[in-house]
Image (cartoon, rainbow, N blue to C red):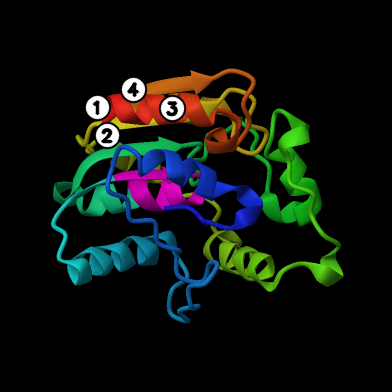
Amino acid sequence: MAPRSKWWRMESFLRGVIQHFEVIAPDHPGFNDSDVCKHMDSVEDMAFHYRDFLDLLEIESVSICASSLGAWIGLQFALTHQHRVKKLVVSNVAGINIPGVESIDPFSMTIHDLSQRLFYDKSKAPQMPPLDSMPIEMLKNRSMHARLMWEKGYDPKLLSRAEGLHVPTLIIWGENDELIPVENGEKLDAALPNSKLVVFEETGHLPYIEKREELLKEISKFI
């Protein structure tokens, strides 16, 4: 559950995953090629969308692998539809707030600055085009991202609710994530009763790019 835009090179990671598993990789509503749904403006809305999505495909249960905002959606889905999740893999999860631990507001900077802050190795950051020639897909993604997180960038009840989630969960985090600190991953691991935290050194917000092979190995071993 993560945007598949070529700018974030998700395809390379997915090619690795499909060598081991049958994979469904949808675009979230409002992202990439997916239409914007006017009534969808919260992570909870997204979670119930995926309930309907699985019903439409006649799939009773799945293992979920998701990153960042997608990981928040995946976690929310598991909280509300626990019986439909076999295993859960979440990376650098958005939506967690810890008093005293500072996170970066992604809407306080340009998309060019943000792309740099996502990586430990800045050379791996994509070369972003000027704003006046930005692909419409990227502007659409940022707009939908803002609809979901502008006013409420986290769920204050997420950690307390996680205490009742018994789905086996693998938490992946980049130790050098500038956007969402690794302390958030540690708090999530402490809250979940059946979880394991794996921290990748010299890694930022996108382990599926900076630590692709290591992440694929952890997922294959866990699922």
Tell me where the magenta segment starts and ends, as one range: 64-75
Residue type beneath disc 1: Pro
Separation of marks 3 and 2 at Cα, in angstroms: 11 Å
Q: Is residue 34 above or below residue 210?
A: below
What amino acid is found at the position of numbered circle 4 in the picture? Lys
Could you tell me the amino acid type at mark 3? Answer: Lys
Question: Looking at the image, do the residues carrying marks 3 and 2 touch, with CB atoms under 8 Å apart?
Answer: no
Please report contact status of discs 4 and 1: CB closer than 8 Å, yes or no: no
Task: Please tell me which of labels 3 and 2 falls first in the chain.
Answer: 2
In the image, 97: left or right of 160? right
Circle 3 Cα neighbour tier, 10 Å, few/some/many (<14 / 14–19 / ≥20): some
Horizontally, residue 65 falls left or right of residue 115, namely: left
Question: Would you name the residue on which mark 3 appears?
Answer: 187
Real-space Cα separation, disc 2 to disc 1, in angstroms: 6 Å
For mark 4, what is the residue? 196
In screen coordinates, is 171 left or right of 112?
A: left
Element assignment for label 1: loop
Q: Is residue 118 magenta?
A: no
Residue at numbered disc 2: 163
- The residue tagged 1 is 193
Q: Secondary structure at mark 2?
A: loop
Whether residue 73 is visible to the viewer of this picture, yes or no, is yes
Q: Residue furthest top?
A: 201
Mark 2 or 1: in front is 1
- Residue shown at 63% from the left, 71% from the top: 140
